[in-house]
Each structure stands twice: as structure tokens, then as C-alpha cells.
Image (cartoon, rainbow, N blue to C red):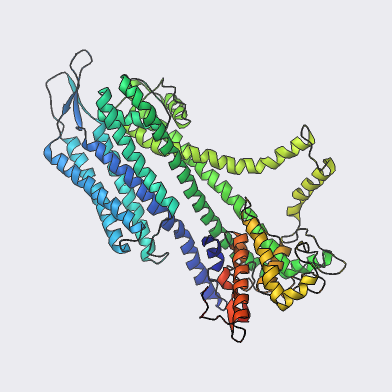
Amino acid sequence: MNQNSCATAAAPDDEPTSLGPQQQEQHNGRESQHRKWWLVSKICPLIAGVFGIIANGFCICSLVQDWREYRPAQDLQDEVQGIKNPPWLIAITSICFGCGLISNLVLFLNLSGRISFFLAQATIIIGWSLSSLVFVVLIIVYALNNPRTQRPGGYVFTQGFYYAIIASGLYFFISVVMTFVFVGAYKKYYTKKFRIGKMERTLLLQQLGLMIYLLLGALLFSTIEGWQFLDAVFWADFTLLTIGLGGDLTPKTNLGRLLFIPYAVIGVTIVGLMVNSIGEVLKTAKKGIQEQALKRQIERIGVRILRDGVSASKKLQKTHPWRSQNEYEFNVMRKLQQTTARKCRWMALTFSVLATLILWLVSAVVFAVAERENEWTFLISVYFTSGALLTIGYGDFTPTTNSAKPIFVLWTLFAIPIITITIGNSADTIIKEFQGFVLLIGSLTVFPGQDGLKKVVKSWYLKLTRDRIPVGACVSTTNPDNGHQKSSTKGRMKKKEVDHIAERDVYFYFHIIPKELCKVLEEIKVFPQKQYGYDEWIYYLSLISMDKPPDREGNIDGSREYAKPQETSWLGQASPLLSANEAEWILQGLTVVLRKGLEKMVSPHESSKFQISEIGGYSKNVTGPKENNAISH
């Protein structure tokens, strides 16, 4: 069973029950700060790990090629000649690479819990900051030391020089990110222990594997085809990312063309797996953001319920007298879950679209400047970046300057995953919004449904008018004649079982609970995850906690006195509705009841009290048999 499914509901209720106005305001302020820094603690270390791998790879690229070369005039037949880097430049660059590599390794060890937090953060921040600072000084000194020549032509900076500039910028960015992480932990906004999950660890390993695979492929094909190593890096980049610019950098030898096939297949597979991992990590982050947003909404709605809840309940009692205050709170929570999920989907789509637009337009400006000697206009750059982002790659415009090629490699490593995620978010958001409308048009025209036109129109009318009803006043299956809810669980429970449930006898533990366990086990497999209705929740809670047992007719009365927001079960932080998987929450609850019942039968003379908090967040105490420590579980 997924332990995280109950972690949310099992979390202690952070809302104080007896604080004054000033203390309550201070508490809310601390909670707001914790939520603002939550994303920093979850995403920033992962970003630092991914960017650190790329920065170290670019630092290797700056080491393998001289930073300056002599380029003769166009009317001369002389070849381009590289100017050897001085030994001190190679030594200092190697030191910067070593500091960056050690910092990245320490970050990985810290994320896996093998190094203490403060030691790791000090090493990471100092190492990457030192690498960035030394790189900047080194680049400035080397750029100002411009040699003179009497030959026609001039000296230009190579791709290695621009790779060094990009590496220094990445090192600086990572050090700033990890500084924010350290500040948040120092102010106790989150724990000082970082533990990454399986998906995050997979993403880091895939990024590391992709960078190593790209560089090794560049080394192999530069040897086979006679290319410069950094030109081969440029070729490997647009090959593995399926852009396919072509140009002069295409395999010409039979051996190169033969090795291209497995190299491309394996590389594209790695990229696909990495994009999938990024999507899963962002999905997890989006789920966490949704949970944080839902908690904020619960706090806000709590004040609103205290102000308007009683009056709204009175209005509902006039129109629907069989409705209970508890059901009102349940429907409020369901409404909050739906609206929060919808807002988070649109927020994720908005951010991904904005990131794509920024990458598209800003990169167009950058490429127009980098390729100005080839007379690229902004329009040409927009055309080129559009084709590259969509992985079309006509090849009619290709970066050729020493500055444009490293920028292109960096840009594509981020742009292609982002555009892929944007397309995925578009499908997740827009298609969900319009899928029902499309099905409605189809049912009214060429694909009539089995329910008939009248039922289709009626169902859509209810959907369109549902939001006009006050919050919590959603129509439910109730019986106004007898004042009881028309339980949707009646099919689950026969009248003769009511006595067994109330008495908690052998029949209850050996027939009713196992039967419900089997049904819930089947419902766990349902995708998307099943959300239980109010009647079903009342039924299962009656089995688990006996808070409101069913009556002799098999009806379940879920009414209870109105409570404050921090005391209610549905709108509190310990609400079962906040569990990651409702079916797993119920399954664990039924398992606890069965275990306690069996212990009672084995040791009937001992008694104790157990809490439903064992199953993830239902805070009521339930009197039951004392657990016999001699019995192994």
C-alpha cells in the first residue's frame, strides 16, 4: 500500500484550537511563509543537480579546445589556425571544473542523506561560487589579452571560449539557487534533510547519462568523420534531440553512417525517458502545489463558514430539510478540490506557455545577434527557432558562428523538454475542458448516445446550473419523506447485517469487513482514482469508527452538530478527503478494524483505546480491545 496515500490525512492538524487573534495572525503568517518556501525546498535542489551536470559538461568542452584562433582574410587560402592556450589557463580551468564536479557530487550525496546538511551546503555554495568567480576573472583577463598580428585577417574566439562563458553563468546560477535553499533551511521554513524520490533520482541519472552519451558520441564521430570535437558536440545535440539541421555536419563515411543508427536510436530513447521523467516530477510538484493551495482555501473557507455557514444551512433546510450540516461541509470540500485542481491545471499550462514564448522570442533575438555576420534578421531567427522548437529542422538556416553553436546546444537542452511538457499540459487542460462539449455536439448530431436526447440535455442543464446553487447545496440522492438519506450503500448492506455492525460480533469481523475489503481492493485499481460520495463515506466511517451507526432499517444518518473549522472532519487538515487515495485510506481503516477485532477475540479480557489516526487522519478516538503485545502482527 502506498504510504504517501495516508500521509496527507495523517498529518497533525496545524491549526491551533485556542489561540487569540494576535497569536492566530502570527500562526497564519508562519504557515504562509512555510508554503512560499515549500517549492524552494522541493524543486531547487533538483534544478541545481540538473544544471550542475550541464555546467560540468560545458566546462569539459571549454577544456578540449583552444579559446582563440587565427582566421585569415577571405581572399587568402590559409587555414584557420588555433592559438594554444597558455598552461596557466588550462590549469585554472581544470581547477574550476574540479570544484564544480565535487560540488555536484556533494549535492548528490546530500540528496541521498549521506552527508550532513550544513557541511554539504557550505561545500556546494563555496565550490560553485568559486568556480563561477574564477571563470569570470579568467575570461576577462584572457579577452583583454588580445595578441597582435601583422598578417591579414584577425583573431576570433572559438567555441571553447563561449562554452566557458556559459559554464561560468550556470555555476553562478546554481550557487544562487542553493543559497536560497540554505537560507530557507536556516530560517526553519523546512527540514534540513533532503531526500529525493525514485523519480527525481531517475531524472538526475538520466541527465547524467545523456550528457556522457552526448560527449562520448561526439568523441567517436569526430574521430571517424574528421570533425572538430565541438562541432561533433553540436551535431550530436541536434541529432539526439531529433532536430536534424544537417548542413555540412552529416556522416560521410560508411562506418559513420552505420554507427549513426544505433547511436541515434539509443540517444532518442534516453531523451524520451528523460522528458517523461521531467513530466512526472512536474506532475508531483503540481500535485504538491495543489495540496498547498487547497490548504489555503480551507483556511479561507473556514472564516466564511463561521460567518455564513449557519445562515446558508438555514436556507438549505427551508428548501431541502433533509440535508445535514455535515453534508454541507462535505460538499464544500468537494467543491474546493474541483476548483483548486482546475486552477492548478490552468496555472501549469500558463507557466509552460510563458516559458515556451520566452525561450522562443528571446532566443530569436540572441541568434539574430550571434549570426549577424551571416545577415540573420529577427524574422529569420524566429523562423529558425520555430522549426527547431517543433523539431522540424528544415536545415535551410543553421548556426555557423562559434558563438551561436554553444548557445544552440544549451538552448535545445532546455527548449525541447519544455515544448514537450507544454504540449502535454495543453492536452491535460484544454482537452479536459472541451471534451465534454465535443461529446455533447456529437451526441446531438452524428453520434447520438444511448441515453437519448432528453437525458443528455437534462444532464448538461444540471451541469450549467450547478454552480448557481449555494456552496454545498449540490443535489444528492435523499428522501424528504422520512428525513433520512437514501443511502447509496444500501446495496452493500442488508437489513439483517445492521445488528451485526452495531454489535461488532463474529459475523461483522468474518463476513462484513472481509466483503468490504474485497470491494475496496477492486476500487483501488480504478483509474482515475475513485472519489466516494457522502453516503459512502458515512457508511465506511460507521464501519471504521462507529461514529454514527446505521439504524435498524439500514439507513445511515450522517447528521451531526455544527463544529468550528478546526474541529470538523471534512474541512480540517486531518480530513480523509485530503488523502492521496481515498480507497487506500478506507482500506487501511478496515484493516485496522479487522486487526483489532481479531485481537479482541484472542484476548477478550484486555481493553484499550486506539485512534483512527492510525489510518491517516480521522481524529476520533474509538474504544476497543486492548492490544495484546504478545500477539505478533
The quadrant of the picture occupied by the N terminus is bottom right
Answer yes or no: is residue 111 visible.
Answer: yes
Q: Is residue 274 above or below residue 480?
A: above
Q: Quadrant of residue 610?
A: bottom right
Say whether residue 183 is left or right of residue 61.
right
Looking at the rendered structure, the number of numbered marks drawn on it comes to 0
| Residue 593 higher or lower than 424, as above or below | below
The percent position of residue 612, horizontal first and vertical second, equals 60, 73
Of residues 578 and 220, which is closer to you in this image?
220
Vertical order, 31 against 55 (above or below): below
Q: Which residue appears farthest toward the right when viewing the image?
A: 481
Looking at the image, can residue 402 be seen? no
Judging depth in this view, the residue of 66 and 26 nearest the camera is 66
614 with respect to 440 (left or right):
left
Q: Nearer the viewer, residue 553 or 241?
A: 553
Query: Residue 235 lies in what quarter of the image?
Result: top left
Residue that protrudes farthest toward the bottom in the picture: 605
Q: Residue at x 79, y 74 (%)?
A: 551
Residue found 13% across the figure and 19% down from its top? 151
Task: Give percent across and percent down for residue 54.
Answer: 33, 42
Task: Give the x, y percent position of residue 47.
Answer: 39, 49
Which residue is more in the foreground, 623 or 89? 623
> Which residue occupies 39% across, 44% down?
206
> Could you say where residue 19 lies in the image, as x and y percent from the top left?
55, 77
State which quadrant residue 558 falls in.
Answer: bottom right
Q: Residue at x 60, y 68 (%)?
A: 591
Left or right: where 549 falls relative to 291: right
